[in-house]
Image (cartoon, rainbow, N blue to C red):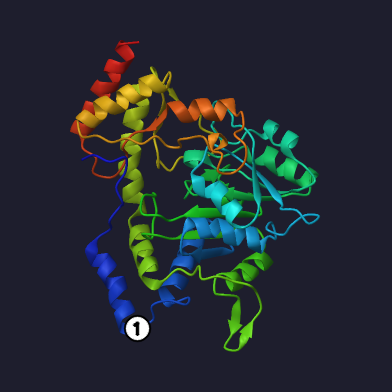
Amino acid sequence: MIPVTKPYLPSREKLDKYIDGIYEREWLTNNGPLVQELTKRLEEYLGVENLLLVSNGTLALQIAYRALGIHEPVNGKPAEAITTPFTFVATSSSLEWEGIEPVFADIDPDTWCLDPKNIEPAITAQTKAIVPVHVFGNACEVEAIDELAKNNNLKVIYDAAHAFGVKYKDESLLKWGDAATLSFHATKVFHTIEGGAIVFKRKEDLEKAKKLISFGITGPETIEEVGINAKMNEFQAAMGLAVLDEIEHNYYAREKIWSYYKEHFSGGFKTQFLNLQSTNNYGYFPLLFNDERELKNAIFKLNLCDIFPRRYFYPSLSECALYNEVLDMPTSRDVSSSVLCLPIYKNLSTDVLVTIGEILDGILQSR
């Protein structure tokens, strides 16, 4: 079976060396040496400060909201945060989990990121934050969003789950916003099996978050915050360090596949318009079909060849009554119903790429 992605597994020899150290020290969690080392190396590699490792990307969002006070009610009613409906469900469910009402604004039809011109009309007296998503690692219009936030006294928390290593104007994209969160799930370009991180703009927010991820405990007999257990453990950090040792090999393999798709399909299918001032980490290759019927036909034919792409993100969250009434977000609805992510991972064979090409060429010829 050819899935949409496979976890990158580093050299067992390298991984075992990190694990041997865990066995020698018998220090498994609570800010162990490997967590400290990974924190330092990631800050250096990404070019950021105030990075906090956590146990997964969803908790990264929830801790960021709490550290920045987004969860606190406004005038006795739940706070609101403006976000995109074209994203993984964790973006909005993490808001709901913290008692924050997600308010959807429609996306840009070309970049598929939250459209700044749709944000301002959604701002109310209850709004405390904007939560944009760098969709498939594509940088949002960060300067326009930053200006909107400043003009309306709002916090900005970027869901940067897909944006590991991405730069904007030669600086880390993670420097934008009051915080940016990362997912280190096994399917990501960089992973720690499960895990995540938050990059804060201000050190004081980092220090508060450090308390929150360890039950609010600050000493043997001191509890200062209402916290939770969101710490990364040493085995997660060991995998992260081993993957980071080989990250450039992973990028190189993914870039070749991504470039093949781009060259082969960009003439016949619509693809995501990438921010011209940002880099690409080759995490995903989404393709937009004419309509849902054509997309389902492609999935059927690919599945017959044991190839399993993914409808990512589907459905549009604005269509889910789970959060509030179903909203009319036509761009998100149309993109969501017609977008398909093709397989991309190290060691994906040329034969599979050729098969995908032949099937999708057939779809184009049948139009």
Find residue 191 and report its horizontal and vertical position in percent: 39, 56
Amino acid under label 1?
A: Glu
Name above or below for residue 249 compared with residue 209.
Answer: above
Residue in the picture at 51% in, 39% down: 135
Work out whether residue 191 or residue 39 is closer to the camera in this orientation and state it: 191
Query: Dot 1: what SS?
Result: loop
Is residue 343 in sight in this rendering?
yes
Looking at the rendering, which quadrant does residue 115 occupy? top right
Find residue 340 and report its horizontal and vertical position in percent: 39, 31
Name above or below for residue 171 compared with residue 328.
Answer: below
Q: Is residue 271 left or right of residue 19?
A: right
Question: How many residues crowd mark 1 within 10 Å: few (<14), some (14–19), many (20+)?
Answer: few
Residue in the picture at 31% in, 71% down: 18
Find residue 336 and report its horizontal and vertical position in percent: 48, 31
Work out whether residue 14 or residue 80 is closer to the camera in this orientation and state it: 80
Q: How many marks?
A: 1
Looking at the rendering, which quadrant does residue 308 occupy? top left
Is residue 272 in sight in this rendering?
no
Name above or below for residue 164 compared with residue 44.
Answer: above
**In the rendered image, which quarter contains the C terminus?**
top left
Find residue 92 and report its horizontal and vertical position in percent: 57, 47
Work out whether residue 249 or residue 157 is closer to the camera in this orientation and state it: 157
Disc 1: which residue: 26
Residue in the picture at 47% in, 59% down: 196
Residue in the picture at 30% in, 43% down: 345
**In the rendered image, which quarter contains the N terminus?**
top left
Work out whether residue 338 or residue 110 is closer to the camera in this orientation and state it: 338
